[in-house]
Image (cartoon, rainbow, N blue to C red):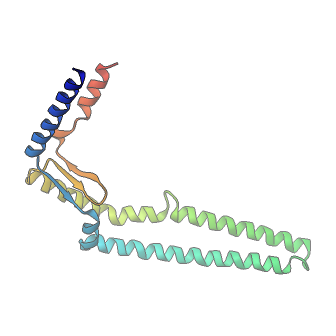
Amino acid sequence: MRNWKKILVLLTIILSVAFAADAMKIGFIYSEQIMQEYQEAVDAMKKLEAEAVELQNVYKEMQADYQKLIEDYEKRKLVSSDAWKNNKQKEIVAKEQQLQNYQLEHFGQDGSIYQKEEEYLGPVLDKINETLKTIGEEDGYAFVFDASKGSIVYADETHNLTEKVLEELKKSK
């Protein structure tokens, strides 16, 4: 008897979803393709990549200088005075700190390269999202998914169940 109830409930849910899906218009996009073919996005990415390459080249030069300091220290430490060794060690530590600071400043979580990404790509992404919203509303799509990432990029708010779920959760306390 219990199994029949479970089967009946499951069947009801499946049929409800099938009818609801038939009534809803759902679309999808490939965001990677948009980013590769939309000229403003391509230009923004090229600009960002050029800045990233420039910053990486500076970092590589700094690393090379750091390595030279270490090599110089290793070659001369046996025949050099303690004062020279102490001075070189301080210089090496300072250079290492410089490297770390540069890396954090430019490539860290809030680094300049991420700020540039927001500066260059932010307006492009806003324009893409606004276009998606317009198409979604004008063409009557309930949802538009990004097939590249498996996420929703537009949803008709009438299908937002968040408040209903929260209400039910509050009732079940």
- Count of numbered marks: 0
| Viewer-side residue, 21 vs 79 | 21
Quadrant holding the N terminus: top left
Image quarter of residue 139: bottom left
Is residue 14 found left or right of 95 in the rendered image?
left
| Viewer-side residue, 168 vs 123 | 168
Q: Is residue 164 above or below residue 141?
A: above
Pinpoint residue 107: horizontal percent, then vertical percent. Answer: 51, 64
Is residue 75 found left or right of 152 in the rendered image?
right
* Residue under the point 64% across and 75% down: 63
Pinpoint residue 82: horizontal percent, then vertical percent. Answer: 91, 71
Image quarter of residue 97: bottom right
Q: Is residue 104 above or below residue 69?
A: above
* Residue under the point 58% across and 73% down: 59
Is residue 109 found left or right of 148 in the rendered image?
right
Spot the residue most to the front: 1
Is residue 83 found left or right of 27 in the rendered image?
right
Image quarter of residue 24: top left
Pinpoint residue 84: horizontal percent, then vertical percent. Answer: 86, 74
Quadrant holding the C terminus: top left
| Viewer-side residue, 70 vs 26 | 26
Pinpoint residue 65: horizontal percent, then vertical percent. Answer: 67, 78
* Residue under the point 63% across and 68% down: 99
